Amino acid sequence: MTEPFIRNHHLNVIKNQGRYIQHCFRDVEDSNVMQAVKGQAADHVKDAFSALKEEEAAVIEPISEVTTSIGVEAFIGSVYPYVQPFPSLDKEQVRQLFPHHKKMQLPDLEAVDFSQRTYLGWNDPGHRKKFIVYELDGKLIGLEGRYTPSKKRDYCFFCQELMPVTLVSFETNDTDEGNPEFYRAIGQHICIDSGQCNKNITDVSRLEHFVRRVV
């Protein structure tokens, strides 16, 4: 049996390409053009993966064979058994990632669908902090940043979509041997709603680069 290999950002690519095919079903009458659209959609999905085994590619390829909008929905449903969820966490595990924050506001983990998470993120309005948990190189990493409340719309650094964002500043471990008080902070516009960001994100390269810089 094929093991789960589709992460949340891959699933978002699949959904986006499926929606594009559905849109074309409504507007395109030429069957040759429609076949090309479906072939390109399949290529876009495959390109989202760094590598695919033969049996994994076989899970993706049926997107090029759908013939109706209902068929697209059926295809999307067919890939869910192959979705690799974000590691399921309980409150104690989250606290261990942030040992210096005994009173931080924790997310409602029971309401989180970990199969649709690229990262776990939440806001602590009382302390004006955003917390992020990401699995990097097989290890869970906890990041904390300070933000100023805002209703600004801009492109989120993580998901690259135009969304309500806030500027979040994260301290890094960079040091200056000649100045023990020195620290470097990185600020990025990030979605206020981390749940929506997880629905948007289709590429983790920016997120992973960011995490590596901070840690």
Image (spheres, rainbow, N blue to C red):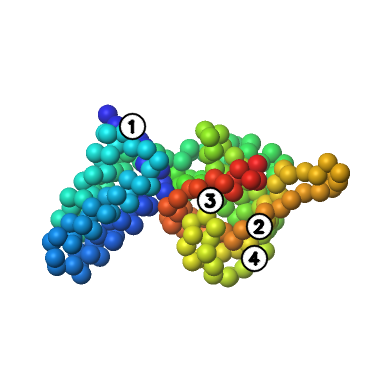
| Percent coordinates x, y for residue 50 in the rendering | 40, 41
Residue designated by label 2: 187
Marks 2/3: CA–CA distance: 14 Å
Mark 4 residue type: Pro
Q: Is residue 124 above or below residue 5?
A: below
Q: Camera-side residue: 102 or 162?
A: 162
Disc 1 + disc 3, Cβ < 8 Å: no
Distance, label 1 to label 4, CA atoms, is 42 Å
The tag earlier along the polypeptide, 4 or 2, is: 4
- Mark 4, secondary structure of its residue: loop
What mark, if any, has residue 3 been given in the picture?
1
Q: CA distance from mark 1 to mark 3?
A: 26 Å
Q: Amino acid at mark 1?
A: Glu
Residue drawn at x 48%, y 48% is 204
**Which residue position is annotated with label 3?**
206
Residue 127 appearing in the image: yes
Residue depth check, mark 4 versus mark 2: number of the one nearer the observer: 2
Gap in angstroms between the C-alphas marked 4 and 2: 14 Å
Query: Relative to the observer, which residue lies in front, 53 or 5?
Result: 53
Tag in front: 1 or 2? 2
Q: Residue at x 23, y 64 (%)?
A: 24
First in sequence: mark 2 vs mark 3: 2
Q: Nearer the viewer, mark 2 or mark 3?
A: 3
